[in-house]
Image: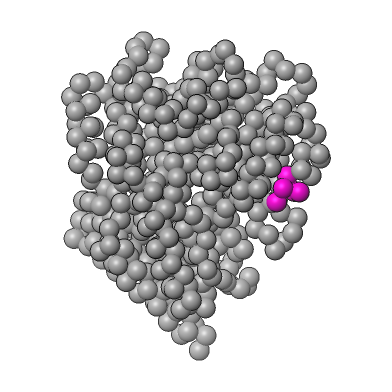
Amino acid sequence: MSPSTMPPGGRPVALHARGARVRDEQGREFIDGSSGAVCVNLGHGVPEVLEAMRSQAERITFVHRSQFAHSAVADLSNEILSIAGPDYREVVYTNSGSEATETALRLALHHHADGPGDRSVVLTQRPSYHGMTAGALGVSGHPSRRAGLEALHDGTIVSVPVTATDPDRPLPDLADWKEAFARVGPARVAAVLVEPIGGAASGAQEIPPEVMRGLRALCDEAGALLVVDEVMTGFGRSGAWFAHLDSDTRPDLVITGKGLSGGYTPIGACLVGARVLPGRSATELAFGHTMSGNPLSAATALAVLRYTREHRLPERARRVGAELRKRLSAIAARYAFLDEPRGRGMLLALPVRQDAADYGVEPLNRRICSAAEAAGLLLYPSGIDRAAQSVLVTPPLTVDDSELDDLFTRLRSALDMVERADSEADR
């Protein structure tokens, strides 16, 4: 994109969006191949959601939970619990996925507060990413986003990152997790926190089902809670309502965000398992924020989930995701700097190959995303290091055939640009 089409801040000014297409004030069209920040699951401008927002706004937009209950909040909780199943009893609302992570950490500490010993350790995976607030970032295996903020992370919870001992494995295996439990001491572990499919940190790398089931068993043996971060994967993107369901694992706490609202409003939530804090209200213990569970956001999220259910979007994500992966595989075969796609459903990534010497100068995934933007395609760079470096390709779950065709036309154009630039640099 030429500098003349950019505002002083360097970004185009968005003006209008429908489906997977976004237009800027210059009239230029972009295919939203990243669903914003992997959140616009339903696509832009869905009439049923917009009508629910308008209807609720005309009645009431805000009451505080300490003063009033509201039917929109109750209906949303019932919808979420009907999706999650009988293993969950309560939903605690937040304004974002980061805050939902903070809530899960608080609830884990409260759960163990009256027990013996000091349970203050949270075992987390490296690479991982659980949010930008201090507590959420403190348990994230994402060094660049934590840089310079160490003083914020010396609080009550001790985060112990678990890393693969084998350099050829991107994620720790069950033996690595067992070693971490033994090293820390099982009686000190409050919780294990993982992403079933990674996003910003690992580029759609999956925890194998046997490792998820093994973590459940390790937590049960130690009396720790299993917390699963489904902010990016939850409510359909993985090809199921929740990504952990494919491993037949039931976490104690489930963190949600992005897909809960489809990008239409700020909202997050923590699903509380039936055996967590028995006889106590997780909502009361979490306190929450001023806007937590406000009627406007609740009504909007309810409309998003009902649309997701009625249009069978989890099943569609599985079906369309298989076609998307097939086409990405064909793309990867054409370019020497790409590897086979990874991920599940419509959370997919193209791994990027780059020499170590070149990575520190300009990561190739960011160059690809810049070239894609110039070609009218929005993608998302991911990976905490050269080994995890990748580009997320995550269009809305409702993306249609013409939008997918345009996505791939523009993706090939962007990759051709990068390939030509590299060839010219090598001369």
On screen, residue 98 above or below 367? above
Taking depth in this image into account, of 74 and 142 the one nearest to the observer is 74
Q: Residue furthest bottom?
A: 427
Residue 397, percent from left and from top: 35, 51
On screen, residue 279 above or below 304? above
Q: Quadrant of residue 182?
A: top right
Residue 174 part of the magenta segment: yes
Q: Main secondary structure of the magenta part?
A: helix
Q: Quadrant of the N terminus?
A: bottom left
Residue in the image at 55% along x and 62% along y: 389
* Left or right of residue 50: residue 328: right
Residue 181, percent from left and from top: 77, 38
Residue 38 seen by the camera: no
Residue 75, percent from left and from top: 34, 23
State which region is magenta.
173-177
Taking depth in this image into account, of 172 and 139 the one nearest to the observer is 172
Residue in the image at 19% along x and 34% along y: 51
Residue 406, percent from left and from top: 28, 67
Residue 271 seen by the camera: yes
